[in-house]
Amino acid sequence: GAGVSQSPRYKVAKRGQDVALRCDPISGHVSLFWYQQALGQGPEFLTYFQNEAQLDKSGLPSDRFFAERPEGSVSTLKIQRTQQEDSAVYLCASSGEGALSGRGYEQFFGPGTRLTVL
Amino acid sequence: QKEVEQDPGPLSVPEGAIVSLNCTYSNSAFQYFMWYRQYSRKGPELLMYTYSSGNKEDGRFTAQVDKSSKYISLFIRDSQPSDSATYLCAMSARSNYQLIWGAGTKLIIKP
């Protein structure tokens, strides 16, 4: 496609439910990033994939958060046993450059999934 | 104290004015400096990036970096109502992809 797409755009979950958020990056993009953006704040880094390898997951806030990109294209962010503090917009970004090339900052973002945990 | 500070605004200016948006930072390792624009309910869109110190111009937009003062700016000339959005600064150290973001400044251009 022309850009990064994410689904669903909106998700309401009851506390304790598991959710799965999908990201379709720009075709051929090597790098994929997940960010969490709280209301009125800038995005916070969660995790990074280069192709199918998860090279950095240092930003994942707890072991309830899990991300995968099994074939090096589509990625899924899964949150188990959701809590109210997980309510945020989850952004996915992709980049045509490998991050260690030094140009990993050129990231293209999807519209985000707004997660509300009741 | 956050690594990157940005005034949240809102900043309201009349159409045609020159807009100045700023960020300060504390980490001297930052080498790459970016400005993103985010419309409501959309993802951030890269506007400008600058490596190290200096100026960069692209159309109506000019980015400035002053590493000695740990201060970066984005200037928008001949502002248009369509420029109304939240502007986020982001930074990273050399060869480090982890972007550290400001909280964003909400800009309103009044027709």
Image (cartoon, coloured by chain):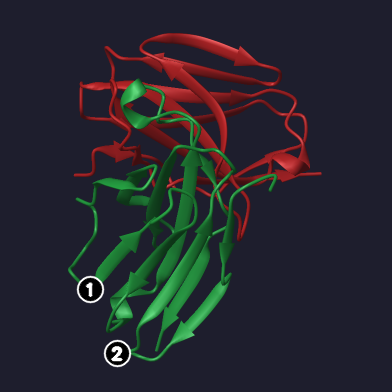
Chain colours: A green, B red
Whether residue B67 sits left or right of residue B14 in the image: it is: left
Q: Is any part of residue A42 visible from this angle?
A: no
Q: Quadrant of residue A15?
A: bottom left
Residue A35: image location, x then y, percent? 38, 53
Q: Residue at x 53, y 37 (%)?
A: B36
Q: Are marks 2 and 1 on the same chain?
A: yes
Whether residue A5 sits left or right of residue A87 in the image: it is: right
Residue A45: image location, x then y, percent? 32, 49
Name the residue that disc number 2 marks: A16
Q: Label 1 is placed on what type of residue?
A: Arg
Q: Does B48 sit above or below residue A70?
A: above
State the quadrant of the C terminus of chain B.
Answer: top right
Residue A103: image location, x then y, percent? 41, 24
Q: CA distance from mark 2 to mark 1?
A: 11 Å
Whether residue A46 sits left or right of residue A12 in the image: it is: left
Q: Quadrant of residue B98?
A: top left
Q: Residue at x 21, y 22 (%)?
A: B29
Q: Label 2 is placed on what type of residue?
A: Gly
Q: Out of B70 and A104, give the one closest to the viewer.
A: A104
Q: Mark on residue A64? A: 1
Q: Chain of mark 1?
A: A
